[in-house]
Each structure stands twice: as C-alpha cells, then as structure tokens.
Amino acid sequence: MVEVKVARLGVDASSSAFVVVLQELNGERTLPIWIGRPEAESIAAHLNNVERSRPMTHDLAQHVITGLGGLLRRVQVTHVHEGTFFAELHLTKGGHPVIVDSRPSDAIAIAIRLEAPIFVADILLEVGEDVDTTEGEPAPADDDTLSADELQRHLTQLRPEDFGRFSI
C-alpha cells in the first residue's frame, strides 16, 4: 500500500463525469477515480471549508464514527474489478479493529473529514483502472489491450488537461 493525497478534483470534459485524482505522497504517480456528483460535491465542500447548516451524509458518518468512540485509522483503495474500485475503512473501536467495505469516493470523503491517511494498492498506481486486481494480479491481457509497460507509459504521459478542467 502506498499513501496518497487528494491532488485534484474536477470534471472529465469528455464524459462530464467527476474525477478525483489521488497522488502518491513523495512521488509522481497518480490514480484517477471517476466518482458521482454527490461525493464530488462533498469532497469539494470539505476541501474548500464550506459550512453547511445541517450535516450531509459524510459529515453524519464522521459523527457516527466519533460518537460511538471509533477511530478511523486509515482508508485503503484495495482493488478494481470490472472497472469498479473497492475500498475499506480501517477503524478501531475499543482497541479492536473493524474493517468496513466502502466505495472509494465515500471513503475519501470520510477520510478527509477525520484527517485519516489514504492508501492505494501499489499495483493500482502502476497500472491504473484497466486491470482487474481481484486476485491481486493483473488480469490477462486481450489482444487489443495495453501491456502493463505500455499502460504505465501512457499513464505517465497524461496531463491534468486530459481529464478536463479541475478545481479544488
């Protein structure tokens, strides 16, 4: 696992979908994850210190975790299967570990509120979303897919403009 930060949040100009870009700490590798509008708005609101009169869903999750005496130790983006990313909330409650399945967008929104570190499986930073890591190994390549080296070269050549206009 590699620790990452939210580097950018924006809209993919080609699909009008929202994207959160995670970047490894002390490194250059990034991982874009396409997310829903509510999660993007929640992340952006928190990053921009927008005050709301009532708690939104991720604020509620934050209050439930802390109100029950839990501690969010970390968030992990663990793998991708059929183009869908999977994540986990790693909590402790009364000294006992509790792992909760989560969508990465929700996990990120909660992590930034609780100032918990975010980690990504190293293989995801190496090859991105176009690999099925369910078993911890890349899926076999089809004839028309990129090899891991080709995909890595492609990902390192991407620019923020390739994902559309970003704002934090």
Image: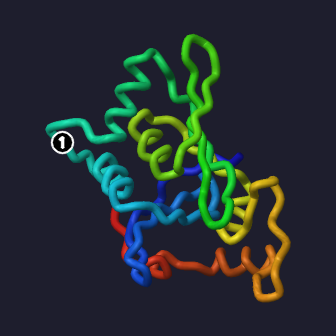
Color encoding of the figure: rainbow
Q: Is residue 48 left or right of residue 21?
A: left
Placement of 147 over or under 30, stated as above or below: below
Q: Residues within 10 Å of mark 1 (few under 14, many from 20)?
A: few
Residue 71 is situated, as x and y percent measured from the top left of the image, at 50, 23
Q: Quadrant of residue 149?
A: bottom right
Q: Give the residue type at disc 1.
A: Arg
At a point 45% along the width and 66% down the height, the residue shown is 19
Badge 1 element: loop
Q: Is residue 56 left or right of residue 9?
A: left
Residue, far front: 82
Q: Is residue 46 left or right of residue 33?
A: left
- Residues 77 and 161: in front is 77
The residue shown at (76%, 82%) is 146
Front-lying residue, 149 or 56: 56
Residue behind mark 1: 52
Query: Residue 39's spot in the image, x, y percent?
Result: 38, 54
Q: Is residue 68 above or below residue 126?
A: above
